[in-house]
Amino acid sequence: MGTLFSAHSVDRDFRFLIGDLDNLSSNECRFYKLSETVLKNREKLMQTEQHQDVSQGIKQSRQLVPFNSNELDDGSNHNNEGARCHNIQASGCSSDANGEENVMGRCATDVNIQTDRNCEVESLFKVLPLNKPLYTTQTYVQWHSSITYEIAFSKCRTSKRTIYLQPINSFPDFIENFELRISDHIYSLFGLIRTFAEFFFLGMDVQVLPCINIQELGWKITTRVHQKTGKQQYLVSDFYLKLRSVMPKNGYCIIGITWTDLYPKEELNFVLGEASGAHKSGIFSFGRFEPKSYNPEMSSDIFEIDEKILWRLLKVMSHEVCHLFGLSHCEYFLCAMNESTSMHEAMSQPLFLCPICLRKLQTVCKFDLIQRFQKLETFLSQLNRSWYIPEIERSIEWLQKCLNFFKEGDTDNSDGFVE
């Protein structure tokens, strides 16, 4: 692995990974350069005992589970026994219902990066084991090349700056009647998702469209009844063109929300959601559970919005919409864009983007990093005061680390890194 991740290799490839930083503020450059420092120290990280334990667990999991766009297969078994997280952080691990530590799918231990002032800056980013050169996955330059026309076109058509959330078919009464007071505002469920999306994709407008009924519209969507759960499922790819047809003219993209289960193709049994960058449309579901974990004697339909459902909504929505901005699955850091092969793995991954993925999103949305982190931290803190959710608490802690990192940069004229 040393020849793939040497400091020289990172020096050479970093501009391809993260793009040109010349037009960013010094504080933003400092933030992105921290990821370069972490990548330069990848070999040291991989040599630690804790990281070796995690890497072994991930290697075993990757040998057993094919990587295929969030597809979940009944035959997929995950061996994560060796993949225990030793430091529970905001962008690290969560605890399951039994209180045991669980792996974030791809988890790494916290590290300290030595600065040129002989002080230590805690790493905000956790690297992933990777057995191929950095440039073979989606770098910033590769991403930018694929959407160059789109970016140029958007400069001419600045009105296309709205993300549309499209509820599909009916939802149970407890969804329709859901209300949560946050600070001095009362949110519906979809209103809560919309507000979070406005801060996550700061610079874009986010709107919730009136609910549509696919039968009334005459949409021909392939359906099936899952043989294990007995529940109806929709074929996810049938929605792409249909959703695009109902997107208003000022829409940048549209994401459907449905209570009904989805499946990606006949031989696979379930998918949380999928998105098509070419169509600028996608869809996700949140009403049930993955069939491979279904036990007819133990499982029952969801009858209320709890912290797990709300966390699932925020996680899956932001992940799928990022795909509509052209982001592929991330293999560099622990990241909201990591691929997942089970519900458990997807829900254990962090809420926020690594620097490489964040740089891509920033290019389109054109947000200021500090402002975005501040707005997210304020909103999630208000949310957690109204309804405590452990995963949200850990996300807030990570945001506060980022803001502290920026605050330290305001009082430091040097960039604080070993070159």
Image (cartoon, rainbow, N blue to C red):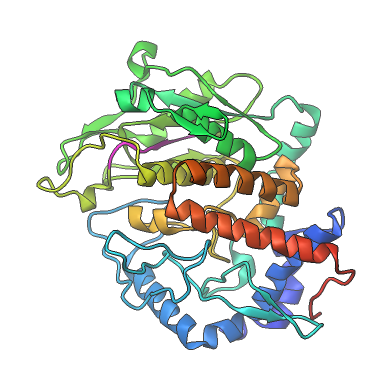
Quarter of the image with the C terminus in it? bottom right
Residue 180 vs residue 175, the one in the foreground: 180
Q: Is residue 369 left or right of residue 48?
A: right
Find out whether residue 287 is within the magenta segment.
yes
Q: Where does the image place residue 162, in percent across and percent down from the top left? A: 64, 28
Q: In the rendered image, which quarter is residue 272 located in?
A: top left
Whole-percent x and y of residue 363? Answer: 74, 46
The residue that appears at 30% across and 35% down in the rendered structure is: 304
What kind of secondary structure does the magenta stretch mostly adopt?
strand
Query: From what the image shows, is residue 418 above or below residue 103?
Result: below
Query: Residue 297: horizontal and vertical position, in percent?
Result: 9, 47
Q: Nearer the viewer, residue 112 or 154?
A: 112
x then y, percent, for residue 377: 62, 49
Residue 279 visible in the displayed image:
no
Q: Residue furthest left?
A: 297
Position of 214 relative to 45 (above/below): above
The reply to whether residue 258 is in sight is yes
Is residue 232 found left or right of 380 in the rendered image?
Answer: left
Residue at screen point 71% across, 82% down: 7
Q: Is residue 39 above or below residue 340?
A: below
Q: Is residue 231 magenta?
A: no
As drawn, which residue projects farthest toward the right?
413
Report the quarter where the N terminus lies.
bottom right
Q: Is residue 155 above or below residue 327?
A: above
Pick whichever, 93 or 75, lies toward us.
93
Compared across the picture, whether 226 is left or right of 327 comes to left
At a point 50% along the width and 55% down the height, the residue shown is: 393
Give the extent of the magenta segment. 281-288
Q: Nearer the viewer, residue 163 or 263?
A: 163
